[in-house]
Every structure is written in C-alpha cells, then in structure tokens.
Image (cartoon, rainbow, N blue to C red):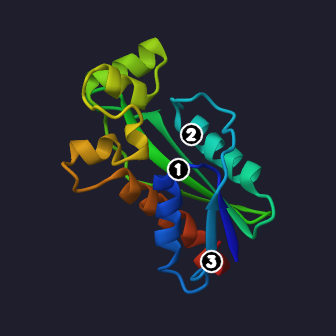
C-alpha cells in the first residue's frame, strides 16, 4: 500500500510512518511526502479553517496512491482560556471516497505569540522566532512549540501521531460508522 502525506515536513511524514506501523491493515505501507497547498491561510484561526486545510491537503496529495493524509495545525476559539484560542492538530485521511478525521489534544500558546498571530497575521513559527522564544525559524519542523512548552514531554510529532490515530478509528472500525 502507498500512502502520500500532503507535506514535505518530516515531522508529519515520520508521525504517519510510525503510527501506521501499529496497525496490521497498514503495516508495511510505503509513506512518502508531497508538498501541496492547503488553500487556507498560512495560520488557520478557526477549527473549520483548520479542518478545511487538512481536507484540501489530503485530497490534493491523492495521486498514484491508496491513501493520502492531510495534517494541519491551527487555532480555534475556546471559551474561558487565557488567550481565547487553542492550537489543535487535525488529520484527514482520504481513501478516494471518504474522509476520516481525527484531532489531537489542544493547547494554548503564550499570550504574546497568540497576540502576534491574531493581530499581525504571522504564523506560529514566525511569532515564536520573532519573540526570541526559539532560535529555530521553523520550530514546527522540529519539536514544535508544544515540545518546548512541555520541556520535551510531548512534541509536535506526538500530537500529530495522536491526530492520525484518531482518524484511523473510522477506518479500523468502519462497520460502526
């Protein structure tokens, strides 16, 4: 089986590769990445936009493969939080007919990061770097902000793997859906 991830980000590709090895029906699949356009803002600011970006990535990547995967991180409004927003990782698996959607745990970014994203239109990587919170221009291609905030206990790859597993629930239990 061939699976294409709609990104060249190794964190996303490795997360898919490592996760599917835990599933007998996907074990041994070849996983490759292909850069595709999400057709949403570089930093989605609603759950709807984040889901749409993941769907777009999955469908755009579906070329000469059995399954494609779209992964998109974005903000979403969450009442009673300190910043009013939380990040969520969305995974969409496209089988050519149906979408299978999963979300990872949500978390808040530091107040100044969220403010720069919402008011200045930056993406998370840009804001985190500009504020001097990292020396990596693309922290999302490494441990992610969540990796820094949890002191390495939970990384971007972990969050991505969680979202992939949640999307695989539909496929592994298709008789229930």
Q: Residue at x 45, y 13 (%)?
A: 120
Residue at the bottom extreme of this rendering: 24
Q: Quadrant of the N terminus?
A: bottom right
Q: How far apart are the two marked residues, 3 and 2, measured between alpha carbons?
A: 27 Å
SS label for mark 2: helix
The residue singled out by tag 1 in the image is 90
Q: Which corner quadrant of the image does residue 63 belong to?
A: bottom right
Label 3 or label 1, whichever comes before in sequence order: 3
Left or right side of 132 for 69: right
Tell me whether circle 1 and circle 2 mark residues in contact (CB < 8 Å). Answer: yes
Residue 89 locus on image (x, y percent): 47, 48
Q: Is 49 placed above or below 31 here? A: above
Residue 50: give its label: 2
The residue singled out by tag 3 in the image is 29
How would you rate the neighbour count of disc 3 (Cα within 10 Å): few for under 14, some for 14-19, many for 20 or more?
some
Residue 103 locus on image (x, y percent): 48, 54
Residue at the left extreme of this rendering: 151
Left or right side of 77 for 32: right
Q: How far apart are the two marked residues, 3 and 1, measured between alpha carbons?
A: 21 Å
Q: Residue at x 67, y 67 (%)?
A: 3
């Amino acid at each position: 089986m061939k699976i294409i991830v709609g990104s060249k980000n190794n964190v996303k590709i490795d997360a898919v590769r490592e996760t599917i090895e835990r599933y007998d029906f996907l074990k041994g699949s070849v996983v490759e990445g292909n850069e595709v356009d999400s057709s949403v803002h570089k930093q989605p600011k609603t759950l709807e936009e984040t889901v749409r970006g993941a769907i777009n990535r999955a469908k755009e990547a579906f070329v000469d493969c059995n399954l494609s995967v779209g992964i998109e991180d974005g903000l979403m409004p969450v009442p009673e939080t300190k910043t009013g927003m939380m990040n969520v990782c969305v995974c969409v698996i496209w089988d050519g007919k149906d979408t299978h959607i999963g979300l990872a745990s949500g978390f808040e970014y530091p107040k100044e990061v969220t403010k720069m994203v919402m008011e200045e239109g930056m993406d998370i990587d840009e804001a985190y770097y500009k504020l001097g919170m990292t020396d990596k221009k693309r922290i999302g291609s490494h441990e992610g902000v969540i990796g820094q905030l949890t002191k390495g206990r939970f990384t971007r790859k972990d969050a991505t793997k969680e979202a992939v597993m949640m999307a695989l629930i539909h496929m592994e239990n298709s008789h229930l859906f």
